Image: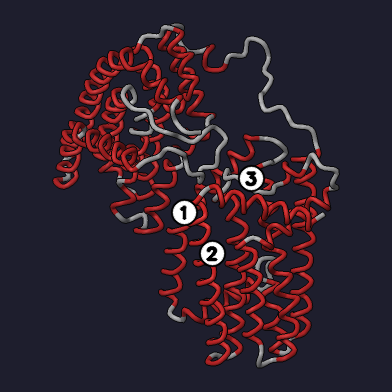
Amino acid sequence: MVATVLRLRYRILGNTLARRPWQLVGFCIGLLWALWALVGVVAGFIALNAFQGLDVARTVAVLAGSALVLGWTIGPVLVAGTESTVDARRLAPFPLTTRQIMSALAATGLTGIPGIVTSLGALASVVLWLRWPAAAVIAVPSAALGVLICVVASRLVTTLSTGLGGHRRGREIFGTILLGVVIMTGPIITGILALLSSAGDVLGRLAQAAVVLGWTPIGAAWAVPGDAAAGDWIPAIAKFVIAAGTLAVLGLLWERALEASVSAPPRQTARTVAPGRLGFFAVMPTGGVGATWARSLTAWLRDPRYLRQLIFVPLFPVLFAFTTGIDGWLFSVSPLMVALILSIAGYADISYDGTAFASVLSTGVSGRADRWGRLLGAASVGVPAVTVVAIVTAAIAGTWTTLPAVLAAALGILLAGYGVSAVSSALLVVPVAKAGDSPFKTVPGQTFVNGLVVFLVLGVTIVLAAPALVLAIVSTVTSSAILAWIALAVAVVAGAGIILGGIVVGGRTLERTGPDLLARIKAFPS
């Protein structure tokens, strides 16, 4: 059965590459890159065996192996949403047991380019222990165990992120959480390296980290040969048991996840609510503005494509706290970055409607009412978020005196951006991710020009917000509290004027361009 699945997998892959030359080119490039990486790893192992001792070999083996397991674990989510040649749902219609499906999927994972390179690299790690024959012998089953942990963990995460019992909401939440983790990876690594550098003995710290990781599920398999080489057989046996137990637990969890997402009947994706429960539509004013406001606010609070914009609300202060500390000026002005992101989040807002924008046009809602409703929905989330971030950062950093100036600059940018977006979203539609897609999936139809348009909208927003920004900067430099409050008043008044102008111009533009926007949305590649 496994051999049949593998033959079909490679036949499909071969046919696909034969029909798509550019995909064949990419496949060849990936293959060459994998071979280059494998050669480098093997050369590194040989050099370590020749010029370094047991302690360095143990540290490298555990740290590299742990990184490999982590890479296999988070990798499927980073590329979630792309097409897979063989997956559980494609095998579900066939008379296969869950264990047989697991065997087939594990085999396809091992026989892909990443699986082959990982297996060869893990087997090459035996070179590290050639000076210790007993360790070299035990390194073979330990490496095999480590590779199986990688593959099974990868398949478990794939099942959870793409299936999760048939719930699209779970997949969206999983991808959104990982997006925040990925965004924070750089500052976290920077902070860790800074701590290691300040500690002085970097190699000693890395060795300590390897000792700790060797007793964890992600590093136990890779620590067994090192303990055997050192003659520590009891710890070596204990770590081998931990690794075997990890594989067993991952296999059990994967089996349960597969049964929930494949064997069980599909779950209902729509919520059933009591009659008369209309959500925001029940509390917003009637008419075109109120209905659009309720729909926009619902999207901001429930659609992951909008919610991902809100990830930056808490992350910007955290990012700057990691990089410059809470005493740094970047931490104090992080509300401005939050405002900048939220102000242009709706620069092509109609794109998220997709072909459902046809229902908006068919209702006869005026362009001005549509502009007001979308702007109020965004502002209902953006204005409180920026205000809260400004107050919290001021409280943490103890910079209450500069709070009015920071608020003036942030609100000036936010309100100006809303006015600009009211016009730009009546002129522009761009390819966006579909509801339920991974945040890491490449969106078909995205071009370099689309990215330039974002910078154009940002530039116009900053220019229109310049009066409030200049007054806020001057008030901060001169420590003038009166000027800071004047800057805040200017930000609100000027922002209101920009919004009114944007609503008028954008409303008229939308009434003229609405059918054309819908036609362009329908023409986007799927």
Q: Residue at x 20, y 38 (%)?
A: 469
Is residue 310 placed above or below 298 in the rendered structure?
A: below
Circle number at residue 104: none
Could you tell me if the residues under marks 2 and 3 are in contact, i.e. CB atoms within 8 Å? Answer: no
Real-space CA distance between mark 2 and mark 3, rounded to the nearest whole angstrom: 26 Å
> Which residue in the structure is indicated by mark 1?
184
| Dot 3 crowding, Cα within 10 Å, few <14, some 14–19, many 20+ | many
Q: Nearer the viewer, residue 360 or 221?
A: 360
Residue 494, position in %: x, y?
A: 20, 25
What amino acid is found at the position of numbered circle 2 in the picture?
A: Leu
12 lies above or below 34: above
Q: Nearer the viewer, mark 1 or mark 3?
A: 3
Residue beneath label 2, please?
Answer: 31
Indicate the position of residue 418 as horizontal and vertical percent values: 31, 27
Colour convention of the picture? secondary structure
Please, is residue 444 above or below residue 238 in the view?
A: above
Residue at 44% in and 44% down: 314
As shown in the figure, which amino acid type bears the numbered disc 1?
A: Met
- First in sequence: mark 1 vs mark 3: 3
Front of the two marks 2 and 3: 2
Q: Which residue is mark 3?
A: 161
Q: Is 463 left, or right, of 136 in this rendering?
A: left
